Amino acid sequence: MRTHRHNTVHRRFLRRDDGSITVEFVITYPLILAALAFAFEFGRMFIAHHMLVNNVRSAERYLARSDLSTGRISEAEEIIRTGAPSGGDMPKWATSIDVVITPAQATFTDVNFREGSQVIRIDATMNFQPLIASFFGGANGTIPIAVIEDIRHVGE
């Protein structure tokens, strides 16, 4: 008799679905949070890349029409780092922005450009600091974002 009653309770337990929604929620909730965190970090990284590209292009326009003295090159480096030639604050998500401005090896031979004019290469690398890395205790984890651009020096 006891076995029959035990089997009946077991069958009733297996047929009931009172907590199934709670179990499904507990299983899917961390996956949803991970997907949202990934989308948020991807958006932040996309904005950081876009900002770096815009700053490099602003520095290119600045250098293309100015003399290539040391002061102008350091101002162009500040434009890349902060967005202004006089300097300012670095973006909060960048731990560092390394900038190298050198004459490029290539020269244009197209008829639209003057032959022999100098080509300037800007190589900028931003070390992007994701928030998720600091959340999990890995504050040293950075993702490098690199932008390399060449511009023809036109002169003043």
Image (tube, rainbow, N blue to C red):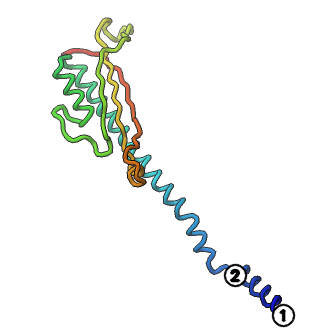
Q: Nearer the viewer, mark 1 or mark 2?
A: 1
Q: Is residue 11 above or below residue 41?
A: below
Quadrant of the rendered image containing residue 114: top left
- Give residue 74's position: percent from left, percent from top: 20, 25
Decide which of 156, 122 is in the foreground and name it.
122
Quadrant in which residue 49 is drawn:
top left
Three-letter code, disc 1:
Met
Q: Is residue 28 left or right of residue 138?
A: right
Which residue was labeled with disc 1? 1
Q: Horizontal and vertical percent for residue 28?
A: 57, 64
Question: Do the CB atoms of the residues marked 1 and 2 lie less than 8 Å apart?
Answer: no
Q: What's the amino acid at mark 2?
A: Arg
Question: Dot 2 corresponds to which residue?
Answer: 16
How many numbered discs sit on the rendered protein?
2
Disc on res. 46: none
**Between disc 1 and disc 2, whose residue precedes?**
1
Q: Residue furthest bottom?
A: 1
Q: Is residue 80 left or right of residue 2?
A: left
| Residue 47 sits above or below residue 53 on the image | below
- Residue 145, given in percent of the width and then of the height, sits at 39, 35
Whole-percent x and y of residue 90? 25, 40
Q: Residue at x 35, y 11 (%)?
A: 112
SS under mark 1: loop
Q: Residue at x 49, y 60 (%)?
A: 33
Left of 2 or right of it: where is 106?
A: left
Q: Quadrant of the N terminus?
A: bottom right
> What's the CA distance linking mark 1 and mark 2?
23 Å
For the point 30% across and 14% down, which residue is it?
Answer: 103
Q: Quadrant of the C terminus?
A: top left
Taking the spot 17% from the left edge, 17% from the top edge, the residue there is 69
The residue at the far front in this view is 2
Is residue 39 toward the left or the right of residue 6 in the image?
left
